[in-house]
């Protein structure tokens, strides 16, 4: 027999500019309040502890993504039926259309290309001595890889970053950022629909494979458009966030960079630790399918549940010294920054490959990153990332 406990509540808006800039005290408070906390400002239950976040992500029968991903109804309706906002057999079917192209094994032939471009980019930037770790590094590599991989034509690429950011902004509450994002999301959807109508995608790309699946009758035209866009924003923004955060963290913690340089085999673990410490994805929503509970807190059917990945990754119940950045952390691989379970990030293998390639190339020549000016956050309802990180690099004589 399960005993229900009282429902704690939290009155702060965790989507104000200040809360997005400095979210971790909010997350700490939520973890201390209980396993599920009613967010008065957002009409949702916040789940912020590692064990509870993991449990919710694993129980996709109870905590559904359809109609639940965003904190506002217009966004939920707009994305209904895409892989992110579908469940069960539909989700598995849609994901199967593209997932085989995104596995580590399938991406193996791309490794040489990604490594080559990372090496060239790093050589150019190191020769300059000073650069913006976001604009010149974190954005440059994925923008040279992801659009071709997905099959995006040259026209329209100038809008990709703006559209990707708007896509994620639209998933928050209906605040000013989400309202500003909606027209841009409409532009992205219209462009995707036009790509499907004209078939104007690069041969051999993920997009071309989606069109072939439509022609075989495996997906509808509308699903085809959704699949064209599903992996664009995540494949760009997660990598950009991780790389920008990594350089900022290594500038703040030079002893951690020394460890990576001394043992390049630490690079994959360092990427996990960056994603744990500065999670690119703040949170996604779910909708309770039935009456249920989280840690003894009753969750009525139809309730919205905000699953805070970034808080889970700082949970001291799971990670010792959770607020310390440590590239040798043995359990960093257990971070939930790429999600978990049925809706684990399908594009994480490519994001890891790009981030690891850049850090490996940098480790061969850069001895120190020094901040060359103020680093500025790019405020977004869903993505935690920097907008600019100016650095000067020192190299071996």
Image (tube, grey):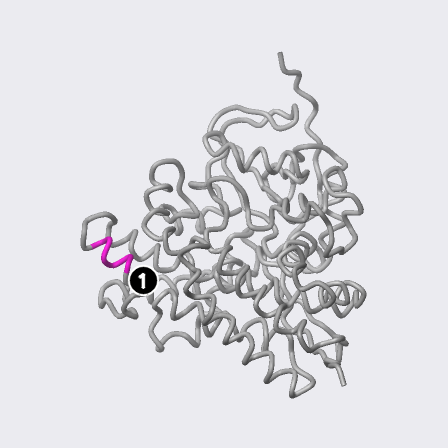
Callout 1 secondary element: helix
**Left or right of residue 310: residue 209:** left
Asked whether 287 falls inside the magenta stretch, the response is no
Residue occupied by mark 1: 207
Measuring from the top left, give residue 65's x and y in whole percent. 46, 40
For label 1, the crowd category at 10 Å Cα-Cα, with few meaning under 14, some 14 to 19 and many 20 or more, is many
Whether residue 167 is situated above or below residue 67 in the rendered picture: below
Whether residue 251 is situated above or below residue 210 in the rendered picture: below
Measuring from the top left, give residue 215's x and y in whole percent. 18, 55
* Residue 259 occupies quadrant: bottom right
What residue is shown at x 79% (from left), y 65% (from top)? 253
Magenta span dominant secondary structure: helix
Whether residue 85 is situated above or below residue 115 in the rendered picture: above
State the residue in front, 6 or 120.
120
State the residue in front, 335 or 24.
335
State the residue in front, 397 or 140.
397
What residue is shown at x 77% (from left), y 76% (from top)? 370
**Left or right of residue 304: residue 189:** left
Which quadrant holds the C terminus? bottom right
What residue is shown at x 23% (from left), y 64% (from top)? 197
What residue is shown at x 68% (from left), y 74% (from top)? 389
Residue, far bottom: 128
Measuring from the top left, give residue 289's x and y in whole percent. 46, 30
Specify start and end residues of the magenta stretch as a single range.
209-214
**Left or right of residue 116: residue 316:** right
């Amino acid at each position: 027999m399960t005993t229900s406990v009282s429902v704690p509540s939290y009155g702060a808006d965790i989507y104000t500019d200040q809360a997005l800039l400095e979210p971790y005290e909010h997350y700490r408070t939520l973890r201390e309040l209980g396993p599920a906390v009613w967010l008065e400002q957002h009409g949702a239950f916040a789940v912020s502890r590692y064990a509870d976040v993991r449990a919710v992500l694993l129980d996709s029968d109870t905590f559904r993504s359809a109609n639940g991903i965003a904190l506002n109804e217009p966004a939920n309706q707009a994305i209904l039926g895409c892989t992110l906002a579908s469940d069960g057999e539909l989700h598995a079917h849609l994901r199967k259309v593209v997932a085989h192209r995104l596995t580590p094994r399938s991406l193996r032939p791309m490794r040489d290309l990604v490594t080559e471009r990372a090496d060239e980019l790093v050589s150019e930037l190191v020769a300059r001595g000073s650069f913006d770790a976001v604009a010149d590094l974190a954005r440059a590599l994925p923008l040279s890889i992801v659009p071709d991989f997905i099959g995006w034509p040259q026209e329209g690429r100038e809008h990709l970053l703006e559209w990707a950011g708007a896509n994620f902004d639209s998933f928050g509450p209906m605040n000013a950022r989400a309202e500003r994002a909606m027209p841009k999301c409409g532009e992205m959807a219209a462009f995707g629909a036009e790509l499907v109508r004209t078939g104007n995608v690069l041969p051999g790309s993920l997009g071309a494979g989606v069109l072939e699946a439509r022609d075989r009758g495996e997906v509808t035209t509308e699903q085809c458009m959704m699949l064209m866009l599903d992996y664009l924003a995540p494949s760009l923004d997660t990598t950009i966030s991780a790389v920008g955060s990594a350089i900022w963290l290594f500038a703040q913690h030079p002893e951690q960079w020394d460890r990576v340089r001394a043992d390049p085999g630490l690079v994959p673990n360092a990427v996990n630790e960056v994603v744990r410490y500065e999670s690119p994805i703040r949170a996604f929503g779910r909708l309770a399918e039935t009456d249920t509970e989280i840690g003894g807190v009753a969750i009525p059917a139809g309730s919205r549940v905000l699953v805070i990945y970034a808080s889970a990754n700082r949970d001291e119940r799971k990670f010792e010294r959770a607020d310390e950045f440590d590239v040798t952390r043995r359990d960093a691989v257990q971070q939930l920054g790429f999600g978990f379970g049925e809706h684990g990030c399908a594009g994480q293998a490519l994001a890891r490959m790009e981030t690891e390639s850049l850090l490996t190339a940098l480790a061969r020549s850069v001895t120190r990153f020094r901040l060359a000016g103020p680093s500025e956050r790019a405020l977004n309802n869903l993505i935690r990332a920097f907008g600019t990180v100016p650095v000067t690099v020192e190299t071996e004589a």
